[in-house]
Amino acid sequence: MLDDLSYDTWTAVLEQADVTLGASEAHGVLTGLACAGILDDASAIAALGAHENDAELIDALELARRHLADTLAEAELGLEPLLPNEELPAVQRSRALTEWCHGFVAGFYFHDRDKEAGDYPDVVGEALADIGDLAEASGTIGDSDLVEVVEYLRVAVQLIYEEVAN
């Protein structure tokens, strides 16, 4: 059983399972699924494009989903998007953040692709639209702005979770 949710561990687990998503995007998918109230193995495996028979991936998914559920249920803005190490250049972390946002949107809408941000209460719709805009962003977010964007995501994701998943 895995006990490490680090970026490097996730990268290795995903590569071994032949999942084409990177660690940040996969974490975003799982977070989006959790915010949509979807916490089962089958949905997570399908959303990641993985094969069901990879035991290490199943263990990692279970650990990640348990961690996400606990973090979101605490409602203390403890969610941290999974990004590469802070010592890496801003361009890599910025790209990973964009991938995380893309994954979040894909995970959130995974089972109901016909819904749009406007189909939710205004505050949820605005947060989903903002995360969608970040997913489409091009260019590098500087280190100081990256901290602010991550903080915004923590609030937005918590708000979405509380309005939709509960």
Image (tube, helix red, strand yellow):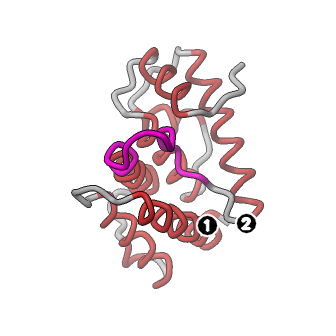
Q: Residue at x 68, y 33 (%)?
A: 63
Residue 51 to residue 130: above or below? above
Reply yes or no: does residue 84 show up in magenta. yes
Residue 132 to residue 85: above or below? below
**Three-letter code, disc 2:** Ala
Residue 86: % across, % down: 50, 44
Q: Nearer the viewer, residue 48 or 24?
A: 24
Looking at the rendered structure, the secondary structure element under dot 1 is helix
Residue 94 to residue 47: above or below? below
For residue 158, which numbered disc appears in the image? Answer: 1
Instruction: Give the quarter of the figure containing the C terminus.
Output: bottom right
Residue 95: % across, % down: 32, 47
Mark 2 or 1 closer to N-term?
2
**Three-letter code, disc 1:** Gln
Looking at the rendered structure, the secondary structure element under dot 2 is loop
| Circles 2 and 1: CB atoms closer than 8 Å | yes
Residue 59: % across, % down: 65, 24
Image position of 129 (left or right of 4): left
Residue 59 to residue 156: above or below? above
Q: Nearer the viewer, residue 34 or 113?
A: 34
Reply yes or no: does residue 87 show up in magenta. yes
Residue 105: % across, % down: 39, 56
Q: Residue at x 48, y 40 (%)?
A: 87
Rate crowding at label 2 as few (under 14), some (14 to 19) or many (20 or more) other CA atoms within 10 Å: some
Instruction: Give the quarter of the figure containing the N terminus.
Output: top right
Q: Identify the residue at the far left of this view.
A: 138
Marks 2 and 1 sit apart, C-alpha to C-alpha, by: 7 Å
Q: Residue at x 65, y 70 (%)?
A: 162
**Quarter-of-image position of residue 60:** top right
Residue labelled with disc 2 = 75
Range covered by the magenta-colored residues: 80-94
